[in-house]
Amino acid sequence: GENVEQHPSTLSVQEGDSAVIKCTYSDSASNYFPWYKQELGKRPQLIIDIRSNVGEKKDQRIAVTLNKTAKHFSLHITETQPEDSAVYFCAASLNQAGTALIFGKGTTLSVSS
Amino acid sequence: GAGVSQSPSNKVTEKGKDVELRCDPISGHTALYWYRQSLGQGLEFLIYFQGNSAPDKSGLPSDRFSAERTGGSVSTLTIQRTQQEDSAVYLCASSLGGGLNTEAFFGQGTRLTVV
């Protein structure tokens, strides 16, 4: 089955800096890659996702890149703000419904002002 | 409903007892997931239901764990003969299902403590 590795496990940055979180996956058939943000004491929420027909997707300060050859995808947050502090999870699955989302172990991002 | 609802929010049980955790997905969502989140750990996949298809049970850690989904809506996760290592937050999520995988909406979770 699918296995997702996520690095780093913790990341501390200064406000305004960029943050990058990286994930690798094992199943070359996977083609749907969402990212979730979980604030302290709250439920995970989707912040961005990418499907394998594109290599990059942006939404304001957040971008995700995908390298299917290397089975690697990354989350980039620019101009970080204290409210970006949270645990971020990457996930992978097949594009079609009927397959489970498999998550990485998460990255705790701390943005200090 | 407005979102995915889980009950109870908190459950304390004695070692060896059975527990049932309930999940009410968003109306119309055909896909339903159960995950386990232990302190400092990620979202561990347990089981996945999609419409009338056979569930993907590949994440269940032992035969003490089982889940069912009645009428394609409400799901119950049952843990038999609970052990202390079962203590965790159990999260349920649902998504539209259908042709493509889409956003999974999570419930607030059930915090299970086995004493």
Image: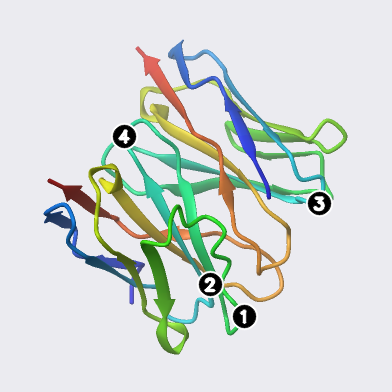
Disc 1 with disc 3 on a shared chain: no
Q: Residue at x 59, y 54 (%)?
A: A101
In terms of secondary structure, where does tag 4 sit? loop
**Tag 3: amino acid:** Ala
How far from the left and from the top, in percent, is residue A46? Answer: 51, 49
The chain that hosts pointer 1 is B
The chain that hosts pointer 3 is A
**Marks 2 and 3, how far apart in space?**
20 Å
Q: Residue at x 29, y 56 (%)?
A: B108
Mark 4 nearby-residue class (10 Å; few <14, some 14–19, many ≥20): few
Q: Which mark is residue A20?
A: none
Q: Residue at x 54, y 19 (%)?
A: A8
**Marks 4 and 3, how far apart in space?**
31 Å
Say which residue label 1 marks.
Answer: B53
Say which residue label 3 marks.
Answer: A29
**Marks 2 and 1, how far apart in space?**
7 Å
Q: Which mark is residue B39?
A: 4
**Tag 4: amino acid:** Leu
How far from the left and from the top, in percent, is residue A79? Answer: 53, 20
